[in-house]
Image (spheres, rainbow, N blue to C red):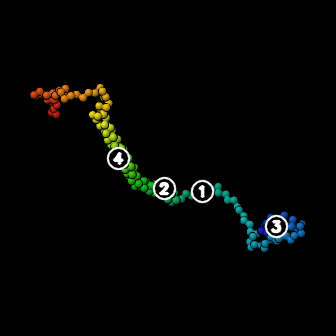
Amino acid sequence: MTSLAGLYDWLVAGKAATAADQGEESPDYRLRALPREDILLFVKEIDNERVAAVRDTRDWFASVSMVAGVLVTSLLLISILLPGGYQLLASRRVDILHQQREQLINQLRMLRVEEARMLSPQRMEESAGDRYVAPSPDTVVHIVPTAGATVASLEKR
């Protein structure tokens, strides 16, 4: 089986034999000889025990300089993009705080309106029912301050 024709004969030998037994003419799979098909390769193992590896310092320096360049470029890119990212996050936080402030102001306004409703004279009379009697103008006592007496003063003592 050193030639291609021998390989074809080996692969189809069973079919050719059965075709010959049945009386059929067997197909011819043999090809003409190819040029230089009989050339074989010889592989020789090489013993590298006594061979010493030579280190290329230029290659090592090129690798180190590439790593340093990538690191410096990465740090530079991060330092350029970091303030913009921080500003974006801070502006979002400020917007959230403005929204919370508006919500709290609206809630305070609603509570003041509710307090005003609760303290209105009509509501007081409704909640007091029969127990509350409005004083007549005759029963109101006005206190007149005495001369020289001060009720409140803004001066320091």
Report the Cα–Cα distance between label 1 and label 3: 51 Å
The label nearer to you, 1 versus 3, is 3
- Please tell me the numbered disc located at residue 9: 3
The label nearer to you, 4 versus 2, is 4
Residue type pointed to by label 2: Val
Q: Which residue appears at 21% of the width and 28% of the height?
A: 136
Towards the viewer: 84 or 90: 90
Residue underneath mark 1:
52
Residue lying at the far left of the rendered structure: 147
Specify whether residue 79 is in view: no
Task: Give whichever of discs 3 and 4 has the lower sequence position.
Answer: 3
Residue underneath mark 2:
67
Quarter residue 113 falls in? top left
SS category of the residue bearing label 4: helix
SS category of the residue bearing label 3: helix
Task: Give whichever of discs 1 and 3 has the lower sequence position.
Answer: 3
Q: Which residue appears at 41% of the width and 54% of the height?
A: 81
Report the Cα–Cα distance between label 1 and label 4: 72 Å
Image: 124 above or below 93: above
Query: Measured from the top left, where is residue 134 in percent x and y?
Result: 24, 29
Image: 111 above or below 31: above
- Whether tag 2 and tag 1 are in contact, CB under 8 A, the answer is no
* Left or right position of 41 against 119: right
SS category of the residue bearing label 1: loop
Residue type pointed to by label 3: Asp
Residue type pointed to by label 4: His
